Image (cartoon, rainbow, N blue to C red):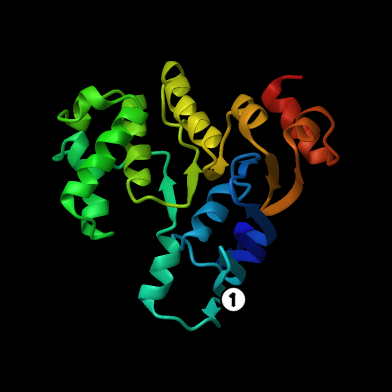
Amino acid sequence: MFMIKTEDLCKDFGELKVLKNCSLSVEQGEVVCLIGPSGAGKSTFLRSLNHLETITSGKIWVEDVLLDDRINSVNQIKMTAKERQKSLLEMGMVFQRFNLFPHLTVFENVMLAPVEVRKMKKSEAEVIVRNLLEKVGLSDKADTYPSKLSGGQQQRVAIARALAMQPKMMLFDEPTSALDPELVGEVLQVMKDLAEEGMTMIVVTHEMGFAKEVADRVVFMYEGTILEVDTPEVIFTNPNNVRTKAFLNSVLNV
């Protein structure tokens, strides 16, 4: 069963074609890493999945629900905002920047969305939040404000906040790129634990070691196009596309 599927996704910013006929399906429990040079369209592709970007044309399914069938930016699928939101809430997202509310404690940051958006009972949400903070190793920081946390700790709070909505899949947009090198490992470990638990994940990353170790499949994007999709073993040892080879040679210094 696929959790997310795209068909011929295109995204134009005026004359600039950022995505060009991108088709990809991600199965339940699969970890897919998107790699490629800056400007390849990786983040735009990811943001298109949960409607942070509006595609120009193409189709997007979430589970078995066709949410988008766009022609010239006009969606041919008619559904209510509530129906569409129900599917989109199945996708949690973690960004490069943590975007935590500075005036709320760690606990309050993670509690906010399940109570306000999911309309979860506070007593139920509290149990979930405490379990999630333990999962990301921050139980002792529940009453701390974001300004007192390291970047790695803030990103782990952001992951807990996304998980508090109990999504069926997680989207990560370069979650370690804003971190100091010594803090990257703690965030990647949380993501590895999620993968081992069977969470469906799409990860835009520059961490080739993570992609090699954790991904079921690696997607190489270049100039708005998906050029190659294969297992990490193939992508990192014997890629088929010359662009993939050149990119990996540059980032791995092979």
Q: Nearer the viewer, residue 54 or 143?
A: 143
- Towards the viewer: 11 or 89: 89
Instruction: Kindly give the residue lying farthest to the top in the view shown.
Output: 182
Picture coordinates of residue 174 (x, y %)?
50, 38
Q: What is the x, y in percent for residue 29? A: 59, 45
> Mark 1: which secondary structure?
strand
Q: Is residue 162 left or right of residue 23?
A: left
Q: What residue appears at the point 70 percent right and 22 percent down from the top-left corner?
A: 252
> Residue 100, can we see it?
no
Residue at point 55%, 83% (across, down): 76
Residue at (59% x, 41% y) in the render: 38
Alpha-carbon neighbours of circle 1 within 10 Å: few (<14), some, or many (≥20)? many
Q: Is residue 79 above or below residue 200?
A: below
Kindly tell me whether residue 181 is visible in this rendering. yes
Give the labeled residue for mark 1.
69
Quadrant placement of the C terminus: top right
Q: Is residue 136 above or below residue 65?
A: above
Q: Is residue 200 left or right of residue 97?
A: right
Tell me where residue 160 appears, x and y as whole percent: 34, 38
Q: Name the residue type under label 1.
A: Asp
Identify the residue shown where x is 32% and y is 26%: 153
Report the number of numbered marks. 1
Q: Is residue 117 left or right of residue 16?
A: left
Quadrant of the image containing the N terminus: bottom right
Residue 170 higher or lower than 211, as above or below = below
Percent across and percent down for residue 244 are 77, 38
Quarter where residue 234 is shown: top right
